Image (spheres, helix red, strand yellow):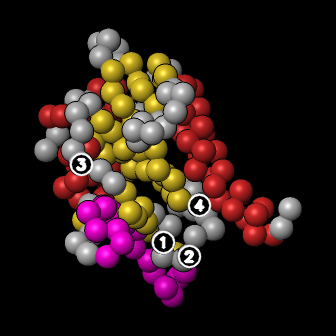
C-alpha cells in the first residue's frame, strides 16, 4: 500500500474511531445508545432519555495532527435547524468536548456566503497563543465545554435558543 493510501485510510478512519470513542464514553456513563446502520442523515447515535424520548446526535472530531491553530476548527458542515438534535464536538489535541443543540450550533457557527462551501457552516472553538505554541477554548465557547453527557440527558435541545 502506498504512503498516500495509508495516510488517507488513517485520516478517513479517524472520524469513525473517535465516534466510537465518544459512544464508548456515553455507554460508560450509562446512556442508552442506539447506532444507525448507515450515516446518510448526519445521525451517528440515537439516545433514549430517561423519560422515554429520543434525541439524535452528530459527533464531529478533530485530530491532534491538524495544523497548529486548527485544533478545534470544524468546517464545511451542512446543517439547518433540526428538532431533537445535538452536536458533540471533540478535539483530540485539546482533549476537549463541546455539546451544542442544533439551535446553538446555527446561532454560533458562521455560514459561508460564497465559494464551493456556500451555505455550509463552520465553527472555530479555539484560539491560539503563538508564543506559547498553545491552543485554548475561546471564551464565548467555554459554556459549551463538557466532561459528561448530562446536557443530552437533562435538557431539551428544542427549548434552547
Callout in the foreground (3, 2):
3
N-term mark: 4 or 1: 4
Classify mark 3: residues with Cα within 10 Å, few (<14), some (14-19) or many (20+). Answer: few
Tell me which residue sits at (22%, 29%) in the image.
Answer: 156
Question: Label 4: which residue?
Answer: 63
Classify mark 4: residues with Cα within 10 Å, few (<14), some (14-19) or many (20+). Answer: some
Tell me which residue sits at (38%, 63%) in the image.
Answer: 76
Question: Label 3: which residue?
Answer: 80
N-term mark: 3 or 2: 2
Question: Do the numbered discs 1 and 2 sit on residues whose CB atoms are within 8 Å?
Answer: yes
Q: Is residue 134 above or below residue 36?
A: below
Task: Name, please, the residue furthest toward the right.
Answer: 1
Per the rendering, the mark at residue 70 is 1
Number of numbered labels in the structure image: 4
CA separation in Å, label 1 and label 2? 6 Å
Callout in the foreground (3, 4):
3
N-term mark: 1 or 3: 1
N-term mark: 3 or 4: 4
Across and down, in percent, residue 15 comes to 58, 50
- Name which quarter of the figure residue 81 lies in: top left
- Residue segment shown in magenta: 115-133
Across and down, in percent, residue 78 comes to 33, 54
Question: Do the numbered discs 2 and 4 sit on residues whose CB atoms are within 8 Å?
Answer: no
CA separation in Å, label 1 and label 3? 24 Å
Callout in the foreground (1, 3):
3
Instruction: Decide if residue 148 is in sight here.
Output: no
Question: Label 2: which residue?
Answer: 67
CA separation in Å, label 3 and label 4? 25 Å
Q: Is residue 80 left or right of residue 146?
A: left
Tell me which residue sits at (55%, 42%) in the image.
Answer: 19
CA separation in Å, label 4 and label 1? 9 Å
Amino acid at each position: 500500500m502506498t504512503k498516500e493510501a495509508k495516510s488517507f485510510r488513517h485520516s478517513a478512519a479517524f472520524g469513525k474511531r473517535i465516534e466510537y470513542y465518544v459512544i464508548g464514553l456515553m455507554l460508560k456513563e450509562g446512556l442508552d445508545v442506539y447506532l444507525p446502520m448507515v450515516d446518510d442523515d448526519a445521525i451517528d447515535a440515537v439516545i433514549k432519555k430517561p423519560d422515554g424520548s429520543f434525541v439524535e446526535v452528530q459527533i464531529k472530531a478533530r485530530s491532534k495532527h491538524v495544523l497548529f491553530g486548527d485544533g478545534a476548527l470544524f468546517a464545511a458542515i451542512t446543517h439547518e435547524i433540526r428538532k431533537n438534535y445535538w452536536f458533540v464536538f471533540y478535539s483530540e489535541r485539546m482533549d476537549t468536548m463541546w455539546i451544542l443543540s442544533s439551535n446553538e450550533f446555527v446561532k454560533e457557527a458562521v455560514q459561508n456566503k460564497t465559494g464551493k462551501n456556500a451555505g455550509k457552516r463552520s465553527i472555530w472553538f479555539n484560539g491560539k497563543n503563538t508564543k506559547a505554541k498553545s491552543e485554548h477554548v475561546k471564551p464565548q465557547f467555554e459554556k459549551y465545554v463538557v466532561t459528561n453527557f448530562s446536557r443530552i440527558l437533562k435538557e431539551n435541545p428544542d427549548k434552547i435558543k
